[in-house]
Amino acid sequence: MSSTYGENLHLTIFGQSHSPAIGVTVEGIPAGEKVDLDELQRFLNRRAPGKNVWSTPRKEADAPEILSGLVNGYTCGAPLTAIIRNTNTRSQDYANLAVTPRPGHADYTAEVKYGGYQDRAGGGHFSGRLTAPLCIAGGICLQILAREGITLVSRIASIAGITDEGELTGSLAGKEFPVVSDARGEEMREAIAAAREAGDSVGGVIECAIFGAPAGLGDPMFGGMENRIASAVFGIPAVKGVEFGAGFGVASLRGSEDNDAFTVENGKIITETNHCGGILGGISNGMPIVFRAAFKPTPSIAREQQSVNLQTMVPEKMAVTGRHDPCIVPRAVPCVEAAAAIAVYDAYLSRKKEMR
């Protein structure tokens, strides 16, 4: 299984949803970078399950244990490895998956690729639970980038077709439900509650903005900032689409409408608009990098669905048991920030090498 990311920052995520622990190893962080573990825990708490009515009832502390790479609060240059122990698993809820794959999940494709050897409990290594160690690595990258003047903020852009209002201009990390418009946020929560009551689920879109990224990050072709960020964000289960700037909307524009005119402000070249999302030719242009990630509805739903018994090859009905989010989007907001921070810091390390 490919669970490694990065060119300069080598990130490897390990563990399964119901294994004794999940974790991450990060190589390439220079020695001497301070890591505030209290700040890291606050970041992880934003993703942690079981905190409100719109998330899974599974409760996990998500407290990271640093095994190596950190001495007296500073990176020492050695690979940084951290784990989170799983303490609240109910593997019996997944006993029927040995023969009946859940629609919308990786149960069937994992069976095809790995035979009967994969861990089915909680989705195994395919589970969204693995975004917790992703957030460990991303949370550390966020702290390092902040000291370089680069900040990442995000919001729930929409849920169940209900769109947030206003512009994302600063951090919403202090809000339990991170939207600009609280009124639209309440409508989204009502839609989540209605889906849960119906034994169903809803999806949505998360928007992320990266402020302070210098011009010159990324490379053309396969090393572009869109490529780097999208690759990391697609590591989050349930992400089905990523768009930058005006995204798919540019397909209906003319060049004169889509092009971002250059100008000068305080001696710095900027663009009057930002349809390109801060990236031209795969390289950051100094404007905010803006992208959105689309999340599908949580596939684990209580409603009866059609599947197939893999032993008898006969279609049969099934209903998913266990504890699941009726909407994964609110808890995925910090995951998107974490993935983007990893990608940006990796590109930042490349740029520092080029400028030596």
Image (tube, grey):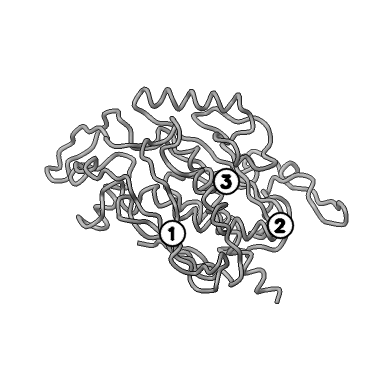
What residue does disc 3 label?
243
Q: Where in the figure is residue 315, as x and y percent of width and height?
A: 18, 36
Residue at x 47% of width, y 24% of height: 191
Specify whether 23 is left or right of 341.
left
Residue 355 circle label? none
Q: How many C-alpha atoms fall within 10 Å of the one at disc 3: few (<14), some, or many (≥20)?
A: some
Residue at x 66% of width, y 62% of height: 217
What residue does disc 2 label?
149
- Give the mark toward the camera: 2 or 3: 2
What residue does disc 1 label?
65
Instruction: Work out whether mark 1 precedes mark 3 in sequence or the reverse, and give the earlier one.
Output: 1
- Look at label 3 and name its amino acid: Glu
Q: CA distance from mark 1 to mark 2?
A: 28 Å
- Give the mark toward the camera: 1 or 3: 1
- Look at label 1 and name its amino acid: Glu
Q: CA distance from mark 1 to mark 3?
A: 35 Å
Q: CA distance from mark 2 to mark 3?
A: 24 Å
Residue 121's place in the image compared with 179, above or below, is below
Q: Where in the figure is residue 120, as x and y percent of width and height?
A: 26, 49
Q: Is label 2 in a helix, a strand or a loop?
A: loop
Q: Where in the figure is residue 288, as x and y percent of width and height?
A: 70, 50
Instruction: Work out whether mark 1 precedes mark 2 in sequence or the reverse, and give the earlier one.
Output: 1
Residue at x 57% of width, y 53% of height: 340
Can you say which quadrant of the picture contains the N terminus? bottom left
Asked whether residue 349 appears in the rendered view, the answer is yes
Asked whether residue 228 appears in the rendered view, the answer is no
Residue 333's place in the image compared with 75, above or below, is above
Can you say which quadrant of the picture contains the C terminus? bottom right
- Give the mark toward the camera: 1 or 2: 1
Residue at x 62% of width, y 68% of height: 349
Q: Nearer the viewer, residue 59 or 267?
A: 59
